[in-house]
Image: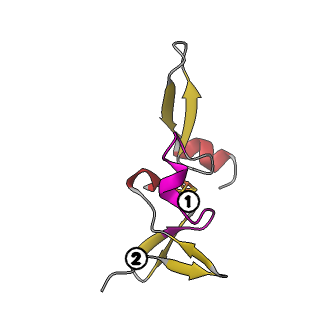
Amino acid sequence: MSVQSLVVNGVECSPVVEQCDGCERTKEHEGVKFCSSYPAPQRKWAHGVCNFATHVKAEIDKGGKVKINPLKASKRAARGR
Ligand code: SF4
């Protein structure tokens, strides 16, 4: 039987979505990854880039389109993470 959700302090948390791959805020519980910052990761990504994500950053290009830039490991290391 797989874990569909996790209840933490009365809040039901859903498993992370594909876009969360590589984010440092994911926590694993019984083989399923959950977000430690937001209970519904799919909603965070429904309208663009998750603003809590540690692995990507949204940037708006000259045409007004939103681009997703992966954060380089060296930048993360420089910030002390
Ligand atoms: S912070 Fe955002 S990207 Fe990271 S695990 Fe949570 S929902 Fe996913």
Can you say whether 70 is above or below 20 in the image?
Answer: above
Residue 48: x, y in percent?
51, 39
- What segment carries the magenta color? 34-49
Q: Residue at x 50, y 34 (%)?
A: 69
Decide whether residue 30 is among the magenta residues.
no
Residue 68: x, y in percent?
49, 34
> What residue is pinned by disc 2?
4
Q: Which mark is residue 50?
A: none
Q: Residue at x 58, y 50 (%)?
A: 54
Give the residue type that dot 2 points to: Gln
Q: Residue at x 67, y 82 (%)?
A: 9
Tell me if mark 2 has few (under 14), some (14-19) or many (20+) residues whose alpha carbon lies within 10 angstroms of its own.
Answer: few
Magenta part mainly helix, strand or loop?
loop
Give the quadrant of residue 36: bottom right
- Of the four image quadrants, the one with ligand 1 is bottom right
Q: Residue at x 51, y 13 (%)?
A: 63
**Is 25 situated left or right of 78 in this image?**
left
Decide whether residue 48 is among the magenta residues.
yes
Residue 62: x, y in percent?
55, 13
> What residue is pinned by disc 1?
24
Callout 1: CB less than 8 Å from ligand 1: yes
Tell me if mark 1 has few (under 14), some (14-19) or many (20+) residues whose alpha carbon lies within 10 angstroms of its own.
Answer: some
